Every structure is written in structure tokens, then in C-alpha cells.
Image: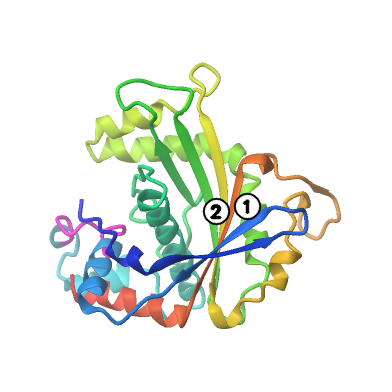
Amino acid sequence: MPWTNKHLEWLKDTGERLTTADGKTVEVWEFRHQNDDKIFSAWAKHFRNHYCYDCDIDFLRGHKSRADYLNDIKFPSKTTKLGPGIRTADFSEILVADYLQWIWGYWLPRVRWGSKVIRDESPKGSDVIGFRFYNPKKTSKNDLLAIFEAKTRFSKGSSKYRLQDAINDSAKDHIRIDESLNYIKQKLYEQGDKDGALKIERFQSPVDIPYKEIYGAAALFDSSLFDDDTILKTDTTKIPRLKKSDDTYPHPNRDNLVLIVILGDNMMNLVHELYRRAADEA
């Protein structure tokens, strides 16, 4: 598949660490994107193929041009009420998937975004799921399943407390992981990737074949909209059970919960430019 990691040269660990209200450490990264046509074009191709493989687009597009097919059918809209928010959500999930694959060394099946029926909606289930095998030839209790939730604040209309929002959603992942794993397995099987589907099956029986789990919450901010005071107020021990309720509970996997913040300049413009290039260069 046409995946590339050249754009991750722009993702830098600042070395700064923030602390939540309950003492959890938050890593701070910066996405220092540059106007590099070669890297941008490779990234746009990588990004486009999450929605539709280049080898399939000519069959699927019918009488539309490639760009029109992507803009009208596959990509979230730039102009509708919900479209820009879905664009940023998809962008953040794919960037976190890249982070897990090339910085953490996980295997990331890329089936979530191309399977959407309605382009201006987010798929159900956990945002990003990665897998790492201690020994590729046999199962091990040291095999790893990583489940991340991602949230963005690229415009003033979004909540300031996006890391808290990601943590709150992450607290539900242990409930929906069975469905999310089945979805990935099914999609890989439908694509003819039986070996990949069997890799997923290894993680579907944790009682019989145990493995380790890592949970994560990632918040992506436009640098101009980030206030580290919101991190100081974030609390992994006070997840609301219901909206508009004072009843809270601790994150069920708080002890193996990773928290990261990614900052970047002009992020909304970057998102729109990436989608433009992805369509125009198809």
C-alpha cells in the first residue's frame, strides 16, 4: 500500500511535559509543517488512500473526474455545516495512526476511513487501534494492543478541554473494543487479506490468550488556541458517567493511559490544503 512517513519528519517531541490535576504526565509534541512540495505530495497520496486506494479510484468514480469523485463522494466537505469538523477529526485520527505506526512501531490496519457511507460523519468505534507482536511467529502475553482517542481544536468554536474530551471517550474503549476489532477483522477479510484478519483474531480472546493493553488520549491544537491551563484542569479520575451530571468515575485503565498534546500553526489551513492536494493530485 502507498503509505509514507516523510511528513513525520515535521513531528517533533518538544521535551516539555505537563501535568494534569491528578498527576498524570502529558507529552507535548509540535507538528512543524513546512512548504515542501515533495513531502506534501507524498503525504497527500498517503492521506488520499485512506479513503480510496489509487488502484480502485478509476473503477469507482464512474463518469466523474478523480478530483470530483473524491471531493463530492469520499472526502468530508469543506463547506457544509458538519464537514470541516469531520475533516479535522479524520485528519487527527490518521496523524495519530501515523504516530503509532512509525514512532511507536505498531501495525495499523487502515480500514476505518474508506468504509464510511456518509462522508460528513465519523465512523463508530474506537478512533485508532494498533497492534504489536512480541514474536511474529507465535502469540505472547507481551503482545500489545494500543487504543487511542483523538480530539482537535483548530478553531475557536471547539471546546478548550479537548484532552479531557479524548480521555472521556477513551474511558469507553474497553466496552467497544470487541466490536471495533471485529470490524477491522471483517474489513481485512473482505479485502482478501486473510493473514491480516488472523492477526486481529489473536486479540479477540484476551482471557484465553492474554496480551497487554495501552490506552491513549491525544489532543491536537492550533498553537494560537492552546492554553496549558486547560491541561492543569484535566483529570483522569473524574470521567462523567452521564452528560450534565456530577456523577464521575476514574478512567478504568488509568494506570496504562498515555496522554499527548500535538501543537501546530495554521492547522485548519493545513487540513484544507492537504485535502485539496489529495484530490487535485489523484
**One can see residue 68 in this view:** no
Specify the color scheme: rainbow
User: Of the residues under marks 2 and 1, which one precedes in the sequence?
Assistant: 2
Give the SS element for disc 1: helix
Q: CA distance from mark 2 to mark 1?
A: 7 Å
* Residue in the foreground of this view, choosing between 134 and 192: 134
Disc on res. 169: 1
Q: What residue range appears in magenta?
A: 48-57
Residue 33 figure quarter: bottom left
Q: For the stretch drawn in magenta, what is the main secondary structure?
A: loop
Q: Position of residue 141 (x, y in %)?
A: 48, 23
* Residue in the foreground of this view, choosing between 39 and 125: 39
Are the residues tagged 2 and 1 within 8 Å (C-beta)? yes
Query: Can you say whether 182 is above or below 111 in the image?
Result: above
Q: Position of residue 202 (x, y in %)?
A: 41, 25
Q: Position of residue 159 (x, y in %)?
A: 66, 72
Q: Which residue is mark 2?
A: 149
* Residue in the foreground of this view, choosing between 63 and 206: 206
Q: Residue at x 81, y 60 (%)?
A: 244
Query: Can you say whether 202 is above or below 26 in the image?
Result: above
Q: Position of residue 236 (x, y in %)?
A: 72, 51
Query: Can you say whether 217 is above or below 184 in the image?
Result: below
User: Is the residue marked by circle 2 packed among few (<14), some (14-19), or many (20+) residues within 10 Å?
Assistant: many
Farthest right residue in view: 246
Is residue 47 a member of the stretch shown in magenta? no
Q: Residue at x 72, y 72 (%)?
A: 229
Identify which amino acid the numbered label 1 is placed on: Asp
In this image, 207 relative to 128: left or right?
right
On-image quarter of the C terminus: bottom left
Q: Residue at x 65, y 54 (%)?
A: 167
